[in-house]
Image: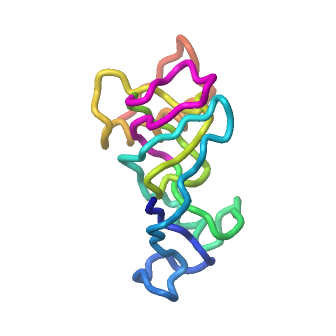
Amino acid sequence: MEALVCREIGDPTVPLSDSSPIVLSRSHPVPELNSPTAVRVRIYATSLNFHNYLQILGKYQEKPPLPFIPGSDYSGIVESVGERVSRFRVGDKVCSMASLGSFAELIVADEKDFTLLDHCSTGSLQHRLTVLKATLLSSFFLGQGVSAFGH
């Protein structure tokens, strides 16, 4: 599979080359289902966020070991599921956030990390809402029966 891999700390704005900190790997290993509740998703939309830029520069508070695949929020279509996955089926449209890994064709995460995108196409609106939802749920502890409005 293809993946954008950060192989060393450096300026991610330089053109891709043999000396740039990020490279396009055209033969990166496909992530395996690593638990009975794992879900593999083919990524159709992701975004470049400021913290991704800082991670590649080595200036973000969380410093992943090298090499790593940057990228956090994404949406896509379920490609395969572990034997105990009950919430999703192959072909479902989902969105999620990860600490790393969305700058790739495929990603694996636990089923609890995904949200089903009912009755809509996987794309930019749902992708943008992923960041909003995760921020609201984690930062403000919003849950069942609580509403928030933004503009």
- Image location of residue 106, percent across then percent down: 48, 49
**Residue 145 to residue 47: above or below:** above
Q: How many marks?
A: 0
The quarter of the displayed image where residue 62 is located:
bottom right
Q: What residue lies at 47% left-to-right and 41% top-to-bottom? A: 41
- Image location of residue 101, percent across then percent down: 55, 54
**Residue 71 to residue 53: above or below:** above
- Image location of residue 65, percent across then percent down: 71, 66
Model colouring: rainbow
Considering every residue shown, the one lying at the far bottom of the view is: 19
- Image location of residue 47, percent across then percent down: 41, 53
Q: Nearer the viewer, residue 38 or 119?
A: 38
Q: What residue lies at 44% left-to-right and 35% top-to-bottom? A: 78
Horizontal side of 116 relative to 99 (left or right) equals left
Which region of the structure is painted magenta? 73-91
**Residue 147 to residue 120: above or below:** above
Which quadrant, please, contains the N terminus? Answer: bottom left
Q: Nearer the viewer, residue 63 or 76?
A: 76
Which quadrant, please, contains the C terminus? Answer: top left
Q: Nearer the viewer, residue 47 or 85?
A: 85
Horizontal side of 51 relative to 132 (left or right) equals right
Q: What residue lies at 46% left-to-right and 24% top-to-bottom? A: 89
Q: What residue lies at 49% left-to-right and 35% top-to-bottom? A: 80
The quarter of the displayed image where residue 144 is located:
top right
Q: Say whether residue 51 is magenta.
A: no
Q: Say whether residue 74 is magenta.
A: yes
Horizontal side of 103 relative to 137 (left or right) equals left
